[in-house]
Amino acid sequence: MHPHNIIKAVLGSSVALLIAAAPLLAHAETPQNFLDSFAQEAKAQNPAFKGFSAKTGEAFYKNKHGGDWSCSSCHTDNPMAEGKHAVTGKVIQPLSPNANPVRFTDSAKVNKWFKRNCNDVLKRECTPEEKGNLLTYLLSVKS
Amino acid sequence: MKISTQLFVATLLVGLSVTAAAGDHNYGPYPSYYTEECGSCHVPYPPQRMTQAGWETQINGLKNHYGTDASVDVPASRTILSYLVNNAGWKDKLAPTDPTARMTKTAWFVKEHGASAPKGKSFSECTQCHTKAAVGDYSEQTLKVPAGWRLR
């Protein structure tokens, strides 16, 4: 094969690959990416911010915050387990990325559900520190 | 080539879902954005089973959706509403009868299901009896009601 043709073939197939992978790349975030950006935001809000705590995250997850529901009302006391919607009973896939690898890989979804669910449980938005503590807890649960 | 085939199939599916006959109790397949946005907390409900007015009330009230915040962003809610409206029913029995447009309070629903759900179950999660409701199949063959349950 003429070298030019080889280059053409390689270029052609990599372009095709890139196009095929584009929808995947759009959501190629990891839980660590979220932790990093929550930490950055927490630091911006509070210069004394020292880092996230799984223990504080766990307490936050199980607390009803003065309302009717906690995170665990639907996601159960064990975030590695399947949950059940408190009203409809629909099965909810596990919240911890350790049990369910698609969790915390898509910022549109993460933002949507924090917005909704924080409003349901706390009647307000969650702070970056609360989100980071929670995710740290979710990642710390192994079974 | 691959992408154009996918596009073709996607277009075909959307076309099918719009033209699906309602007489067979089969309302799927639903577009994936609909299942994603309106099928997380309950199964996606068949657009054919309520009127346009009912769906407009539902979508406009998502911020407070029966005690939970079910809000979606503006572009998504526009897409969803136009899908619902394009496939909405028109008969009187499909019209909302309460201010929040609960499908479970429409005349057809009450006639088919009675006014209250079987003990320990909720009308909002259809799969408890319509076992294939997640994909829009509400046929008799896939229906499994609790033993001894009768319409009241």
Image: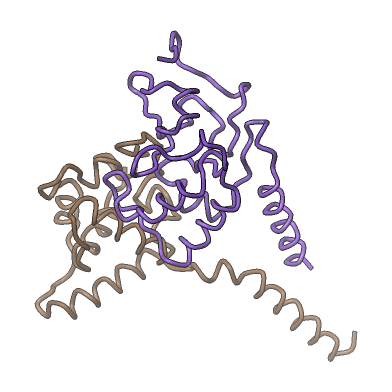
Chain colours: A brown, B purple
Report the side of B128 relative to B132 (left or right). left
Report the side of B56 relative to A24 (left or right). left
Q: Residue at x 59, y 24 (%)?
A: B142
Residue B106: x and y in percent read 44, 33
Front position in the image: A55 or A65: A65
Q: Residue at x 43, y 37 (%)?
A: B103
Residue B27: x and y in percent read 61, 39
Whether B100 is drawn above or below A127: the answer is above
Whether B43 is drawn above or below B107: the answer is below
Quadrant housing the C terminus of chain A: top left
Residue B82: x and y in percent read 55, 58
Task: Residue at the far bottom: name it.
Answer: A4
Front position in the image: A4 or A26: A26
Task: Residue at the far front: name it.
Answer: B92
Residue B146 position by quadrant: top left
Q: Residue at x 19, y 62 (%)?
A: A130
Q: Residue at x 79, y 87 (%)?
A: A7
Quadrant housing the N terminus of chain A: bottom right
Whether A45 is drawn above or below B60: the answer is below
Front position in the image: A74 or B47: B47
Task: Residue at the far top: name it.
Answer: B148
Report the side of B43 relative to A42 (left or right). right
Report the side of B52 relative to A127 (left or right). right
Residue B87: x and y in percent read 60, 48
Number of numbered discs on residues: 0
